[in-house]
Image (cartoon, rainbow, N blue to C red):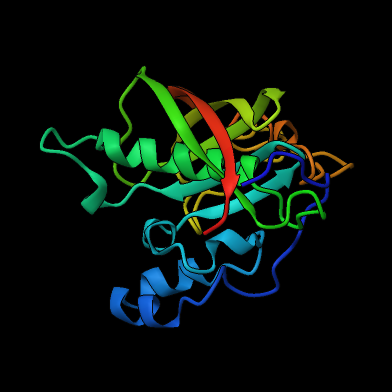
Amino acid sequence: MSDAAPAKTHLNPGALGDREGLADREGPAHREELADPEAVAHPILTDDYATQWMGLKVLALGDGSATVAATLRREMLNGFGIAHGGMIFAIADSAFALACNPHTPDEDQAGTITVAAGVDVNFLAPAHVGERITAVAARRAQAGRSGLYDVQVFASPQLPASSGDPASPGDPAPSGDPAPSGDPASPEDPSSFGAPGRLIAEFRGRSRTIPQR
């Protein structure tokens, strides 16, 4: 993993990585989620089967930043019926990894990867099945091969696919979705998505760039 990345968003016309086998095992509903044509591509996800199982969607990539989202499924809950802390951690960790590793390494970054050297996480509020979990990662400091990143994790209710009572044009945008605008938000900047819900966890990661084996 290396920490300098071009501030460029890479749109994927298809699915993230090779998901055919996984999608066949997970069933039609999950297969549709994994094949989201609006997902953003990153090469480290090609063989990342944990991220694929979570149904993670990469919304934005930038120089030292990443925004990802996933829908909280029943098998991601703990015995109390709320999001398992490990699932929230995993979503945040995926955003952390994407922020650390450039989509297109330059010559100085070739042959290296950036991995987690340590992490602190604080769980602030529960999340519930069906909610959209969004993790926003940003680099705070870089010194040689070491970096410091913050990841904020948010939860928001999913919008129904269709409704018999559509919202009035004058109604405010639901929580977690940016208000409509004549100038669409650029996917280059994670903050342009607006407030993605209520804050449920904060994650601080320490990265280390090492030779790729």
Rendered residue at 61%/47% (across/down): 1
In the rendered image, which quarter is residue 146 located in? top right
Please indicate, yes or no, whether residue 190 appears anywhere in the rendered image.
yes
Q: Is 159 left or right of 30, judged from the image as shown?
A: right
In the depicted structure, whether residue 24 falls above or below residue 86: below
- Quick check: 103 left or right of 49? right
Q: Position of residue 47 (x, y in %)?
A: 47, 68
Q: What is the number of callouts on the image?
A: 0
**Foreground residue among 17 and 168:** 17
The residue positioned 52% from the left and 26% from the top of the image is 206
Horizontal side of residue 65 vs 74, given as left or right = right
Q: Is residue 29 left or right of residue 111?
A: left
Which percent across, then down, holds residue 117?
46, 31
Whether residue 167 can be seen here: no
The residue at 29%/44% (across/down) is 129
Q: Residue at x 69, y 47 (%)?
A: 60
The residue nearer to you, when weighing 186 against 159, is 186
Identify the image quadrant of residue 120. top left
Q: Position of residue 185 (x, y in %)?
A: 80, 41
